[in-house]
Image (cartoon, helix red, strand yellow):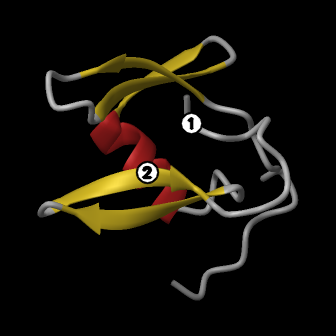
Amino acid sequence: MSKKASKNTRKKNVRKTAEDATGRNTHFKDGNKTMTRAQFVKDIKAGKYLGYTVKRINGKDTPVSKPDKSSKNNLE
């Protein structure tokens, strides 16, 4: 993806709020905004979350934190 993020886009801290029986994260929260995995993936691809990327895991697009020295932005 070669789109540049807008000035309004910042690195955000997102929390996982639910996971399925296999341990896959299914729901997320950013402040007051709640998202499904599909919604979060769409927002990451749109450049709204600079600290996160999408990986294809077991055939599904999966949001993951970009590797860095901070643990504050990890999906836990």
Q: Which mark is residue 8?
A: none
Q: Which residue corresponds to mark 2?
A: 63
Residue 67 at x, y = what percent?
Answer: 68, 63
User: For residue 29, which quarter of the picture?
Assistant: top right
| Mark 2 crowdedness (10 Å alpha carbons): few <14, some 14-19, many ≥20 | many
Residue contact at pointers 1 and 2, CB within 8 angstroms = yes
Amino acid type of the residue that numbered disc 1 sits on in the rendered structure: Leu
Residue furthest to the bottom: 2
Q: What secondary structure is marked by label 2?
A: strand
> Looking at the image, which residue is at 73% across and 40% down?
73
32 w.r.t. 40: above or below: above
Q: Which mark is residue 75?
A: 1
> Looking at the image, which residue is at 82% across and 50% down?
10
Residue 25 at x, y = what percent?
Answer: 34, 32
Residue 60 at x, y = what percent?
Answer: 18, 57
| Mark 1 crowdedness (10 Å alpha carbons): few <14, some 14-19, many ≥20 | some
Q: For the residues marked 1 and 2, what is the alpha-carbon distance in whole angstroms?
A: 9 Å
Mark 1 or mark 2, whichever is nearer to me: 1
Amino acid type of the residue that numbered disc 2 sits on in the rendered structure: Pro
Q: Nearer the viewer, residue 28 or 68?
A: 68
